[in-house]
Amino acid sequence: MDLTDRAEHGAFRGEVRQFLDQNKHLAPDVSSFTLRMRPRKLSEDVRDWQGLLVDRGLTSRTIPKAYGGFGAEPDILKSRIIADEFFAADTVQGLRNMSISMLVPTMLEHGTEAQKQRYIEPSIRSQLVWCQGYSEPNAGSDLASLQTAATEDGDDFIINGQKIWTSGAHVADMMFCLVRTEPDAPKHEGISYIVFPMDTPGIEVRPLMNMTGAPAFNEVFFTDVRVPQANVVGQRGQGWQVANSTLKHERGLLGDANRSLDSLLRVGKLLQNESLDGRPLIENPLFRDRYIRLQARTQAMRLHEMRLISDSVKGKPRSLGDMVVKLLGCELNHQLDGLGVDILGEIGVLYDESSMLRDGGAWQANFMFDLGLIIGGGTAQIQKNIISERGLGMPREPKVAEPKVAGA
Ligand SMILES: Cc1cc2nc3c(=O)[nH]c(=O)nc-3n(C[C@H](O)[C@H](O)[C@H](O)COP(=O)(O)OP(=O)(O)OC[C@H]3O[C@@H](n4cnc5c(N)ncnc54)[C@H](O)[C@@H]3O)c2cc1C
């Protein structure tokens, strides 16, 4: 991909600046930096801002016009310019979350025309908020062991079972969910990917507290939940392939290099603003050294991500590169938050109500929340297993023997 900043990019930068000059006052006074660990119902001003950004092609740029997007060709530099200018103007950018960054691309790849027409536009405008019903008490890393059952009843399925760690289920309008529709098929083949509203009778959501003190994820129980069979995305019984499509996008979302760059720039500001013995911390060699190392890693992740986008634009088959994004990007984000906490010194251990908090306590909360993202979406250990076995050709780990059944 040609990364030269061409004349059209200069003009585009001017357009983004002009948009911000004219509309910045409409932006909600919240930052994704402080929001991401506390899912809550989106307020009207957040939805309105998101809608305006969609209309102007400043988010969801490449979603086809037929489904309510802007229909632009992918252009990494333009995406970068948007991110840079919004950061410089200290203005909240288009949302990136499970609905927009995971469900929408999966729908585009696997949904029927009717499903795309129905779900994509309200999702990119954040009028529909989704949650992900994958994990179960006995199906996490070994996700294909999931047992939530969907049995046929006329044109519907009746769903019974339980999900766990379902982020944002308490504020979501819809769930994309993995259920077992063919109990006798081999475990990867009997799964279907199905979507339904969270207010369908028979769904009970029980919040779980995470270590930031926020109820960010939940247990979700299904008792005779009736869902039309037409809500299956992709082929019935082939939900594993659809689920993997969502997971691929999830890995990109969680390890996103734009997010790391955003944190890096914030750490840089913090280093300039905070001081030790009357001198700004940016002059302290220990902190500067840590910062430069993380800066180099952030840059490496950005270039890696650009290469992956470039490959995908050229239609090259996907490599294991997105696993590297998830593994190293999440670890990098955690280290950036950790540097932020250390820069703050004794203020970095304050929490919640203190008037001394910097950035609303986001450094501390993100440090704890980002540790969770090293687990969510597939743990670091599992990413390492897959990269080493499928990418580096190392020997497969031995399978645990099935317990012998007495008398067998
Ligand atoms: C912040 C957060 C948000 C989440 N949000 C969602 C959500 O919205 N929807 C959803 O469906 N799920 C969600 N999850 C669940 C997440 O996907 C699972 O936690 C994850 O897949 C791990 O599964 P588990 O918790 O059952 O751990 P287990 O699979 O039981 O693993 C326990 C430990 O054993 C290790 N381990 C397991 N198998 C192997 C192996 N073969 N080799 C080496 N090590 C191994 C793991 O790495 C881990 O350290 C979320 C989790 C977190 C932390």
Image (spheres, rainbow, N blue to C red):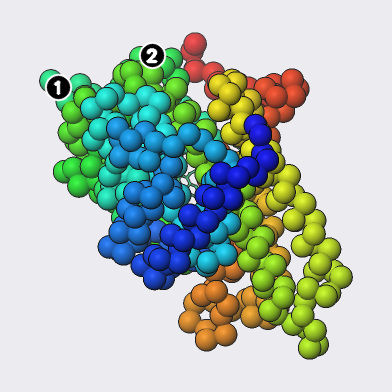
Q: Which mark is residue 155?
A: 1
- Which residue is depicted at the point 55% across and 74% down? 359
- Which residue is depicted at the point 39% across and 36% down? 71
Q: Circle 2 sits in a helix, a strand or a loop, which is it?
A: loop
Q: Amino acid at mark 2?
A: Ala
Q: Which mark is residue 185?
A: 2
332 left or right of 218 in image: right
282 left or right of 307 in image: right
Q: Which mark is residue 251?
A: none
Q: Return the residue found at the far right.
A: 285
Q: Circle 1 sits in a helix, a strand or a loop, which is it?
A: loop
Q: Is residue 123 visible?
A: yes
52 left or right of 327 in image: left
Q: Return the residue found at the far top.
A: 408
| For residue 401, above or below residue 45 | above
Quarter placement of the N terminus: top right
For the residue pair 209 and 312, the one nearer the viewer reads as 312
For the residue pair 52 and 402, the one nearer the viewer reads as 52
Residue 272, horizontal then vertical, whole percent: 72, 75
For the residue pair 402 and 1, the one nearer the viewer reads as 1
Residue 199, horizontal then vertical, whole percent: 20, 47
> Which comes before the other along the chain, label 1 or label 2?
1
- Alpha-carbon span between mark 1 and mark 2: 21 Å
